[in-house]
Amino acid sequence: MIPLPKILTDAKHGEMRDFGLVTARVLDAEGHEGLGYTYTVNAGSGAAAALARELSGLLVGEDADCIEALWQKMWWQMHFVGRGGLASFAIAAIDTALWDMKARKAGLPLWKLLGGHDPKVPAYAGGIDLYLPLNELLDQTRENLESGLRAIKMKVGREDVSEDVKRVAAMRELLGSDTPLMVDANMGWSVDKAIIAARRFAELDVTWLEEPTDPDDFDGYARIQAEGGVPIAAGENLHSLPEFRQLIGRGSATFIEPDVATCGGITPWMKVARLAEAANLRVTSHGVHDLHLHLLAAIPNASFLEIHGFGLERFIRKPLIVNEGLAVAGEDLGHGIELDFKMLSTYRLDH
Amino acid sequence: MIPLPKILTDAKHGEMRDFGLVTARVLDAEGHEGLGYTYTVNAGSGAAAALARELSGLLVGEDADCIEALWQKMWWQMHFVGRGGLASFAIAAIDTALWDMKARKAGLPLWKLLGGHDPKVPAYAGGIDLYLPLNELLDQTRENLESGLRAIKMKVGREDVSEDVKRVAAMRELLGSDTPLMVDANMGWSVDKAIIAARRFAELDVTWLEEPTDPDDFDGYARIQAEGGVPIAAGENLHSLPEFRQLIGRGSATFIEPDVATCGGITPWMKVARLAEAANLRVTSHGVHDLHLHLLAAIPNASFLEIHGFGLERFIRKPLIVNEGLAVAGEDLGHGIELDFKMLSTYRLDH
């Protein structure tokens, strides 16, 4: 369990004080290595670790280059207790490690192995700041702009929509008209309330409204998008390809937001990206930005990379840098992420 | 991990040798008790136990009669790692224990607390017998008939549909025209293959075709049902109310089959039953038949109770009895199920 630098709040997860990190390392017979990870919020770290351990037994002796076959094997082994949900977290950690190893073996950075479109990806700061007083929210935003970010996301979903509108208006004033501003309601609203809120945000030129209501209500999302007049971003709580097919196929969102660490890994993440491309939609990301930089750099329909607020970069030897609003994928082999396991070991739970 | 009396096979889960059982006991301040359980196949027993343990901490000091409030609390605590999937297994065990305790406190058998419709529920034998030679399949069926069963389900999904048809025809001949015969493909087919198979089974007067293809393909299910001409049963792999809403709302099945041990417990199971009732559909069950007897006896739209083949009854002090095709819910308080923990302890894993 990794403590957060400060307590974070959003509309549905309450106060978050820490998160769980589950890592997976794969090794092949020639000594190649790959690293993957997933993370949990509020609960489930021990369970995710237990599932990953069970899955690891399936891989021994298999051909590590046939990731699709291994992914299917893991998916079906977990199907009775899975079909998404927590099983997708565990599969994600291992799948990511396999892709990392494959890229290293190929002598390529991951984003090139996966396609290689454009190493420069626009990034935004994903603030987790629902109950931050307005002056602190504005200070935080100034810091983000100073550190090179040129797009900002803030939380909404306070008791009264007009409070949210006031905060968004203040942010728009600070940012001026050229800086993209996104808002994230973390499932806090009913469909009707979300439509009312979206119409107010539309006047403030909001780039997207994220997760306005329950992620299972695909029809509700389509209504909010059509009637609210603001593009919808969604996907962080979906954990399988068929769930994304529904989100995309039913016109429920414009910015598709799979989280590679919780949707089953790079294998399904790339399929989701292709589904979105075929539907003329753009892909953003949620969480684990050092990984997502490679995925968004690989595809032609990337929108923004979220710079997530959990502070995992404290444990990464060379965390990504944002300059003039852009993160740039480099030439290190694989994803190039080295976790500081010594530092992490301080927080280790022996599940 | 509980070994199965014999190795069982179906079209997708391969050879099953054992299953995981996770139990939950709740106690209130006055000394009342309740018992619940869930089970896992192929993987996930340790993870489910870890989740249930995490959930148990949420209940301490709460009002045990407000099960809806507790269920929501558990659901949202697990939402980031859940939205169904394995989280629903852990929630199910605890939710079931809470309902058991509430019924005991009310001095009622569970089926009466939940509504009380008809204690007599038609039962069928759920054979897990895909690779049983035909003569053994017929022998097993004769035994089932001798033991009081008057409806039988068999597995289909062999490599060649005509093999399945031959086996189903032989079963129909043995059973005569009056005994309901169901078939279960355990997700083994594509939609087109399922339609072809369904049309052949229709001629053999099959009561339902169960899980012909991937449970996420709700539109595919609707096609199979409409074009195949056999009612579809589905639901054992769905783990949330919104998933059942899709199954029901899109005309994907006629016999709705929630598993109380894997769909989140009695609280959502009853909601699924009401959704089905509103749509003029009937409810059947999957697994844990001693529990499901109470649920089906409570509702007006019950169809058949599955007598499941995992043999959990070996560990239950008074397992249900089927007589002339009927299981009858009794007057014991709660669900009345006492597990033999001493016998179970032989198979205990210390997760």
Image: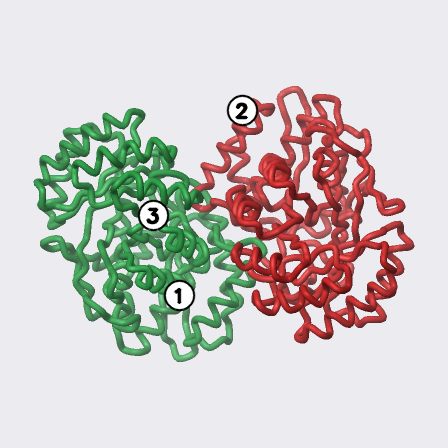
Chain colours: A red, B green
- Please give left or right for residue B102 compared with residue B56 in the image: left
Q: Chain of mark 3?
A: B
Up the image or down, B44 lies above or below B69; here it is above
Residue at the spot 69% in from the left edge and 60% down from the top edge: A184
Provide residue A257's location: percent of width, then percent of height. Answer: 65, 48
User: Where is mark 1, residue-wise?
Assistant: B267
Residue A86 seen: no
Provide residue A170's location: percent of width, then percent of height. Answer: 83, 68
In the image, which is nearer the foreground, mark 2 or mark 1? 1
Per the model, the C-alpha gap separating discs 3 and 1 is 19 Å
Provide residue A164's location: percent of width, then percent of height. Answer: 73, 70
User: Where is mark 2, residue-wise?
Assistant: A62
- Please give left or right for residue B29 compared with residue B303 in the image: right
User: Where is mark 3, residue-wise?
Assistant: B234
Instruction: Looking at the picture, tell me which residue is in the foreground, A296 or B71.
Output: A296
Instruction: Looking at the picture, tell me which residue is in the foreground, B79 or A324.
Output: A324
Q: Are marks 2 and 3 on the same chain?
A: no
Ranked by sequence position, the earlier of labels 3 and 1 is 3
Residue at the spot 84% in from the left edge and 55% down from the top edge: A179
Up the image or down, A125 lies above or below A268; here it is below
Q: Secondary structure at mark 1?
A: helix
Q: What residue type is disc 1 on?
A: Thr
Instruction: Looking at the picture, tell me which residue is in the foreground, B173 or B281.
Output: B281
Per the model, the C-alpha gap separating discs 2 and 1 is 42 Å
In the image, which is nearer the foreground, mark 3 or mark 1? 3
- Please give left or right for residue A303 compared with residue B55 in the image: right
Q: What residue type is disc 3 on?
A: Ala
Q: Chain of mark 1?
A: B
Outermost residue toward the top in this view? A30
Label 1 Cα neighbours within 10 Å, binned few <14 / some 14-19 / many ≥20: many
Residue at the spot 27% in from the left edge and 33% down from the top edge: B197
